[in-house]
Amino acid sequence: MTGSDRPPLSGVRIIELAGIGPGPFAGMLLADLGAEVICVDRPGGNSWAVHGHSIMFRSRRHLAVDLKTTAGAEVVRKLCADADGLIETFRPGVAERLGVGPAECLAANPDLVYGRMTGWGQNGPMATMPGHDINYIALAGALHAIGRKDQPPVPPLNLVGDFGGGGMLLGMGMLAGILAARAGGGGRVIDAAMIDGVSALMAMFHTYRSEGMFTDERGTHLLDSGAFFYDVYRTRDQQWVSIGAIEAPFWQELCDLLELPDEVRDNQFDTAGWPEYRRILAERIATFDRAELDKLLLGSNTCYAPVLSLAETVEHPHHLARGTFVDIDGMVQPAPAPRFDGAPPTTPRPRRAPGADSRSILEGLGYPAEEVDALIGSGVVAD
C-alpha cells in the first residue's frame, strides 16, 4: 500500500468510552479517517445510543465492559497502554470515580491523549449540571441569534452544539494532541466543552458586534434572514428555494434572470427598502415551480439552490456524481469526509453489536483464554 493509498490515520488507535451525540460523532470522524477505534460499551449497550446513532458508531470494534467493577476498569487501563487517545463523555468526576480518569490512564501510557467531551466544560459553576445541545448553544449566544425578526429563537437541530461545536472540536483536539505527543510532547488532557466550541463558531459575529454591525435584534442582519437577498422563498408548487446573492455580480445576474425591476436591482443594500424588496422577490419567485427555477438558475452565477429534503438529497445529481452518500448494508449514509486525493479516505463498515469483539480484543491484550472466560462468566465483560 502506497502512502496515497493508506488512510491518513492508519496506525492510530483510539479508545472510545461509548456515549451519545458528540462523542460518537468524534469517534466516527476519526474512524472514517482510518483510525482504529475500539468502542467500550456497557454490557447490554446504551438504550439512548441506538436510534440515530448507528451511523455514528460505524467502523468500530466493540468491547462491552462493566466499568463499575475493578476488573472492568483494569481492562480499559490496559487498552490505554497501546493507544494514542481516549474519548470519554461523562460528567466531570465520573471517570475518576470509575478508575479510568486522566491520572490512571496516563499512568498506563504517558503519551496518551485523553479527550473529554462535555457541554459545560470540566470546571465552572455549571460544570456538573445536566444539559443538552439547546442549553449549550443558549448559554453561548448562538441560539439567541438564530431566528426571524420578532419571532422566537429557532433551535437548529442539534448541529451547532453537539456536532459542530462538540464532536468536531474534540476530533480536531485529538488530532492536535496526537501530533504533539508523537513529536515528543507527551500526553495531555483535552477539555472539549461545547460552550467553548460554539463560542468559537460565533467568532465572526462577535467581531461584527464589536464593529457595531451586529445587534441583539435577530432577523435584521445580512446572514440571519434580515437581508431579502439571503433567504428562502416558496415556489408556486409549494416547495422552497434558497437565495444567497450577496456579491454585486451574483446579485445582478439574479436580477437579470428573474427580470427584477430596477428599484430592486439598484438598491440591494438599502435596508429601509428591504421589506418591500422582499415582497417583490417573493412574488416573482412564486410564479415559478421549483423545477423551473432549477432549470433557469442552476449553473448560473446566482448563488441559488433548491431546499431539498433528506430523501431528495441522496438522489440529487450533484451528490450522485460525487458519491456524497454510500449504501452500507442497505443503510444510506454520508461518505467519509474530507476527501484525500479525490476520494473518501475509507469505506465505512456497519455498526457491530456491543461486545461483538470482546473476546478478540481481550486476547489481543494478552489475556489468556481462561481469564477471558472468567471475565465473561462473571459479567465484567459481555460478548
Image: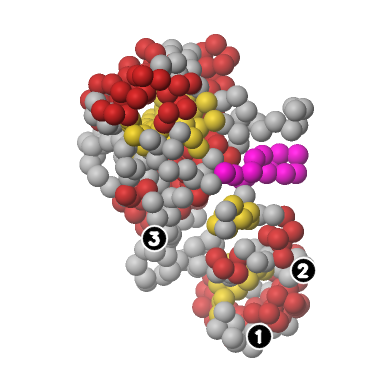
> What residue is pinned by disc 3?
155
Amino acid type at circle 1 is Phe
Q: In the picture shown, does residue 339 fall above or below 240?
A: above
Q: Nearer the viewer, residue 253 or 174?
A: 174
Q: How far apart are labels 3 and 2 at the CA level?
A: 32 Å
Identify the secondary structure beneath mark 2: loop
Residue 337 x/y as whole percent: 62, 45
Circles 3 and 2, Cβ within 8 Å, touching? The answer is no
Q: In the picture shown, does residue 139 fall above or below 220?
A: above
Residue 263 x/y as whole percent: 66, 81
Q: Residues within 10 Å of mark 1 (few under 14, many from 20)?
A: some
> What residue is pinned by disc 2?
300
Amino acid type at circle 3 is Pro
Q: Which mark is residue 288?
A: 1
Residue 211 x/y as whole percent: 49, 49
Q: Earlier in the sequence, mark 3 or mark 2?
A: 3
Magenta residue span: 336-349
Residue 157 shows in this picture: yes
